[in-house]
């Protein structure tokens, strides 16, 4: 494992775990899914680093892994009635209102910029205030 990947895991794994726990109520399941995602990221790590936005690339791998594992474990709409293949703005709302991340943390974990995320959160809040 490269030093860069170890640092990436140190920074992002706790946030990935928090996100996965939204979809997998059992902590062991959330942990396993995040480990699968990190292994998938590790497998393409040089490509992720060469991309224009490594955090966004890694986030997409996490989301794809969560969606795939959630669908396999609980069917298309899990026990919560939510699906992890939500729109990006709904992901922002989940990270902010459910997980409790501040906009700079969301920008860091998803590979976005804080101003755009703040704007998207405001729009999402207006549209879906009662959902969260």
Image (spheres, helix red, strand yellow):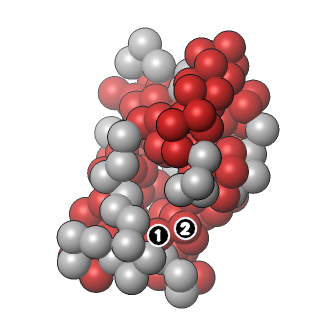
On the question of residue 107 being in view, the answer is: no
Residue of label 2:
22
SS class, disc 1: helix
Residue 130's quadrant in the figure? bottom right
Tell me if mark 2 has few (under 14), some (14-19) or many (20+) residues whose alpha carbon lies within 10 angstroms of its own: some
Q: Nearer the viewer, residue 71 or 11?
A: 71
Work out which quarter of the rendered image holds the C terminus and state it. Answer: bottom right
Q: Nearer the viewer, residue 110 or 54?
A: 110
Determine whether, in the image, residue 97 is placed left or right of residue 29.
Answer: right
SS class, disc 2: helix
Q: Which mark is residue 23?
A: 1
In the image, residue 13 lies at what x, y percent? 62, 55
Please determine whether, in this image, residue 50 is positioned above or below residue 36: above
Q: Which mark is residue 8?
A: none
On the question of residue 31 being in view, the answer is: yes
Dots 2, 1 in contact, CB < 8 A = yes
Please report the residue visible at 21 percent of the width from the left and 70 percent of the height from the top. 76
Determine whether, in the image, residue 129 is placed left or right of residue 89.
Answer: right
Please report the residue visible at 68 percent of the width from the left and 57 percent of the height from the top. 99
Please determine whether, in this image, residue 48 is positioned above or below residue 71: above
Q: Nearer the viewer, residue 26 or 124?
A: 124
Give the spatial CA distance, label 2 vs label 1.
4 Å
Q: Nearer the viewer, residue 61 or 84?
A: 84
């Amino acid at each position: 494992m490269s030093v860069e990947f170890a640092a990436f895991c140190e920074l992002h794994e706790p946030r990935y775990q928090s996100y996965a726990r939204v979809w997998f109520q059992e902590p062991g399941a959330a942990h396993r899914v995040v480990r699968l995602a990190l292994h998938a990221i590790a497998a393409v790590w040089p490509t992720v680093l060469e991309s224009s936005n490594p955090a966004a690339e890694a986030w997409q791998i996490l989301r794809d892994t969560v969606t795939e594992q959630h669908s396999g474990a609980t069917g298309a709409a899990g026990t919560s009635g939510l699906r992890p293949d939500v729109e990006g703005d709904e992901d922002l709302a989940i990270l902010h209102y459910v997980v409790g991340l501040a906009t700079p943390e969301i920008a860091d974990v998803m590979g976005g910029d804080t101003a755009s995320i703040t704007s998207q959160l405001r729009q999402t809040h207006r549209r879906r205030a009662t959902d969260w």
